[in-house]
Each structure stands twice: as structure tokens, then as C-alpha cells.
Image (cartoon, rainbow, N blue to C red):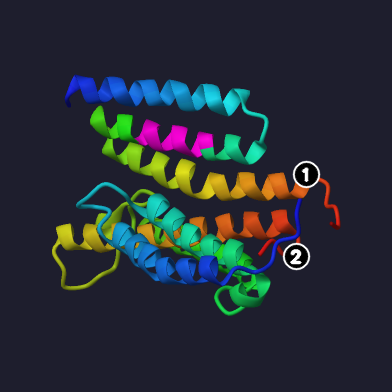
């Protein structure tokens, strides 16, 4: 491979594009029950925005966004959100992930189910994003390609 | 869906698959697999499976291209010229 210098045009383009991809990822996560999409697709969009900055800017720039040691705790937090919601529904006397029985007081069952699905989707998106970024970080092993 | 448009997408799908198999440069092959999965996403949407098409566009055209590029950079020999 030829030695490649850091290109300011590529970095500027990806810096311009990244926030909109990330915003669209959050939109896909939060509107997963109305429209196509959901936690997995939204989390992959978030991971794509993070990977775009990583592959175009290298470690010097991506250190400012999500550091390498932060990916594993983020994935663990996502999985814990998922399983805690399911197990709380189980402790309240229902099945695993039985959204109706979640302990939100003063809400009708449809809204309780709505919020339960939203919490699950946020957990899935966080775990998917962190694990995809972790796969990239483990593949490059600290080398720079920018 | 208009069947002529689907036929054109199928033709481009075949062309991109054959180019991805036959080309020597690996980066061109990666770009061609990305084009393949994007056309596949268009076909999924045309067949009514919007969720599957969305996943295919995001995974196949977004993340797996980045991972393939990283694999190519890892496996080629680095020369200092």
C-alpha cells in the first residue's frame, strides 16, 4: 500500500456528514414502532457515523468522540437495559418482556407498552453501536489508516 | 412496481456480481459488493419488505464495506516507497 497523507477534504466531508447520520440513527430508534427500522437499524446507523469519523480521521480525531476503552461498558449498559426491563416485567408477575406489567404508575396499558418498547429499543441500539465500533477497534489494533 | 425498472435493477445486480468476482483489484471488488447490496436493498423495497431492505442498505452498504476495507489494509504488504 502506498503511504497516504491525511486528506483535509475527506476529513471535512465526513465531519460535515457525521452529525446528520447520527441524528437519523436516533430518529430511526425512536420512531421504530411507527415506521420501518428499530433498535438494530438505528444502532447500525450510529455505528456507521462513528466508523466514518474513525476511518477518515484516525485516532487523533476519533479520540475526541468515543474512546476505545468506552465501547465495552456501553455494550454492557445496553444489554443490562434490555434484560433489566424484561426481568422487571417478570418480577411483576408476567412473562419475560411483558410490557404491560412494567411499574409505570398512572398510565394506561397502551402507553406503558409504548414506553417499554422504547426503552428496549434504546438498549438494543446502544449495544449494537458499541459492539460494531468494538469490532472495528479490535480489527485495526491501534494502527492508523487515515 | 414497474417491471421494466425491476428488470434494469436485476441486470445491474448481475453485472455488479460478475465484476466483483472477476476483477483483480480488491478495493474494486469491495465497492462492487457494496453496489450489489444496495441494489439488493432496492429490490427488497420493491418487493414490499421495507424493513429487510433498510437493514440490507445499512449493514451491507454501510458497515461491511468499512470492515472489508480494514481487512484489505491489514492483509496487504506495507512497502515504504
**Image location (x, y in percent) of residue B62:** 48, 49
Please give the residue where the numbered disc 1 appears in the rendered image: B75
Residue A114: image quadrant is bottom left
Q: In the image, what residue occupies the spot 34% across and 43% down?
A: B54
**Image location (x, y in percent) of residue A98:** 31, 52
Q: Are the residues under marks 1 and 2 on the same chain?
A: no
Q: Is residue B39 magenta?
A: yes
- Disc 2 is placed on an element classified as loop
Q: In the image, what residue occupies the spot 36% across and 60% down?
A: A25
**In the visual, does B73 lie left or right of B15?**
right
Please give the residue where the numbered disc 2 appears in the rendered image: A142
The C terminus of chain A lies in which quarter of the figure?
bottom right
Q: Nearer the viewer, residue A48 or A41?
A: A48
Q: Label 1, label 2: how many angstroms apart (C-alpha)? A: 15 Å
Residue A40 position (above or below residue A146) = above
Which mark is in front, 1 or 2?
1
Amino acid at each position: 500500500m502506498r503511504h497516504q497523507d491525511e486528506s483535509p477534504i475527506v476529513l471535512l466531508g465526513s465531519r460535515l456528514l457525521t452529525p446528520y447520520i447520527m441524528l437519523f440513527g436516533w430518529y430511526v430508534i425512536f420512531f421504530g414502532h411507527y415506521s420501518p427500522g428499530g433498535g438494530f437499524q438505528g444502532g447500525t446507523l450510529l455505528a456507521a457515523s462513528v466508523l466514518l469519523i474513525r476511518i477518515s480521521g484516525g485516532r487523533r480525531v476519533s479520540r475526541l468522540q468515543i474512546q476505545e476503552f468506552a465501547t465495552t461498558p456501553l455494550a454492557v449498559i445496553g444489554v443490562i437495559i434490555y434484560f433489566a426491563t424484561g426481568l422487571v416485567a417478570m418480577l411483576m408477575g408476567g412473562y419475560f418482556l411483558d410490557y404491560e406489567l412494567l411499574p409505570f404508575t398512572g398510565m394506561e396499558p397502551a402507553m406503558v407498552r409504548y414506553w417499554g418498547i422504547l426503552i428496549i429499543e434504546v438498549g438494543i441500539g446502544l449495544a449494537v453501536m458499541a459492539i460494531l465500533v468494538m469490532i472495528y477497534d479490535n480489527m485495526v489494533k491501534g494502527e492508523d489508516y487515515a | 412496481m414497474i417491471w421494466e425498472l425491476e428488470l434494469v435493477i436485476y441486470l445491474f445486480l448481475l453485472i455488479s456480481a460478475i465484476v466483483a468476482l472477476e476483477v483483480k483489484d480488491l478495493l474494486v471488488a469491495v465497492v462492487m459488493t457494496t453496489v450489489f447490496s444496495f441494489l439488493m436493498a432496492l429490490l427488497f423495497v420493491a418487493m414490499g419488505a421495507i424493513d429487510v431492505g433498510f437493514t440490507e442498505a445499512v449493514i451491507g452498504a454501510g458497515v461491511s464495506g468499512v470492515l472489508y476495507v480494514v481487512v484489505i489494509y491489514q492483509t496487504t504488504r506495507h512497502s515504504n516507497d
